[in-house]
Amino acid sequence: MPTPTLYPRLLLTGAAGGLGRQLRPRLKAHCEVLRVSDLGQLGEAQAGEEVMPMPLQDRAGVLRLLEGVDAVVHLGGISTEQPFDDILQANILGVYNLYEAARQQGTRRIVFASSNHVTGFYRQDEVIDANMPARPDGYYGVSKAFGENLARFYFDRYGIETVAMRIGSSFPEPKDRRMLATWLSYDDLERLVVAALSSPVVGYSVIYGMSNNAHVWWDNTPAKHIGYQPQDSSEPFRAAAQARQPKLDTQDPAVIYQGGGFVKMGPF
Ligand code: NAI
Ligand code: 15L
């Protein structure tokens, strides 16, 4: 783990979610004050914390949320394929409100939880990198692609740095065969976020969030400058994942494409 970067005030959105609950205690070493936000259900403020519930679509509220914030880890929003109108509020208006508030409040860096679903319509027999065109696999993936483009614009125009993490599948363990390629352990998630926060110059960068898995679809060479070094691998879970899913239907779009089941969700 690199030497901690001490941001005076770091904001964690989506702090009540699956990944937010993992990162909340781990980010304290990297800031003097950790401001945590979500729709609600954040519990009491722990030592060194400020708790500020906020819907991301509340523009004036998000402007207050960013007051005095030096850097953001932005996890908040809808994290699966859902009806467009819901995604519009949480992920599209939400990410716009965040970047616009960052501009007005002088925030310098944002670590944005994007998703592998930005490129979910590439095939599982291809290896891609972040310089290849987006091929979103649903409204959710489109909303993350919007967030990435917005982040690039806010860097080019206003100099706000972003690392967009196209997270694969970050869960306690890979649940199926697809996740043997896409799995990101919680410890590697922490390593990735800490690298994204502490790397001296990131400009606008995109990195796939995966562990050091044996068989992968994503080449992170263009993101080497971030200095992310995964330590975990899905390999110890291979036998269990294969036993759980002994046969694959090779005609199934969920097996053909990298986005898995997301490529056939909806319309809602
Ligand atoms: P999650 O669904 O458990 O957490 C998301 C949090 O955002 C929730 O606590 C929710 O209350 C909050 N949220 C939703 N709408 C909101 C709104 N309008 N205003 C304020 N807060 C709102 O998701 P998880 O797994 O923790 O993921 C965190 C982030 O990482 C998400 O942005 C997700 O898209 C992204 N991601 C996660 C992956 C994973 O494998 N867990 C894979 C790829 C991306
Ligand atoms: C995501 O973007 C989702 O947030 C997460 O719940 C997983 O489904 C993950 O992608 C995945 O592709 O496995």
Image (cartoon, rainbow, N blue to C red):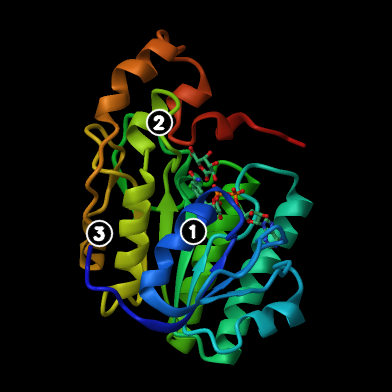
The answer to which of marks 3 and 2 sits earlier in the sequence is 2
Residue 202: percent from the left, percent from the top? 31, 74
Q: Residues within 10 Å of mark 1 (few under 14, many from 20)?
A: many
**CA distance for labels 3 and 2:** 20 Å
The answer to which of marks 3 and 1 sits earlier in the sequence is 1
Image quarter (top left, top right, bottom left or bottom right) of the N terminus: bottom left
Asked which quadrant contains residue 82, the reply is top right
What amino acid type is highlighted by mark number 3?
Answer: Tyr
The answer to which of marks 1 and 2 sits earlier in the sequence is 1
The structure residue drawn at horizontal position 42% and vertical position 8%, both measured from the top left corner, is 247
As drawn, 171 above or below 70: above
Mark 1, ligand 1, within 8 Å: the answer is yes
Residue topped by disc 1: 113
Asked which quadrant contains residue 176, the reply is top left
**CA distance for labels 1 and 2:** 19 Å
In the image, 33: left or right of 202? right
Residue 179 showing in the rendered view: yes
Residue topped by disc 3: 228
Residue topped by disc 2: 174
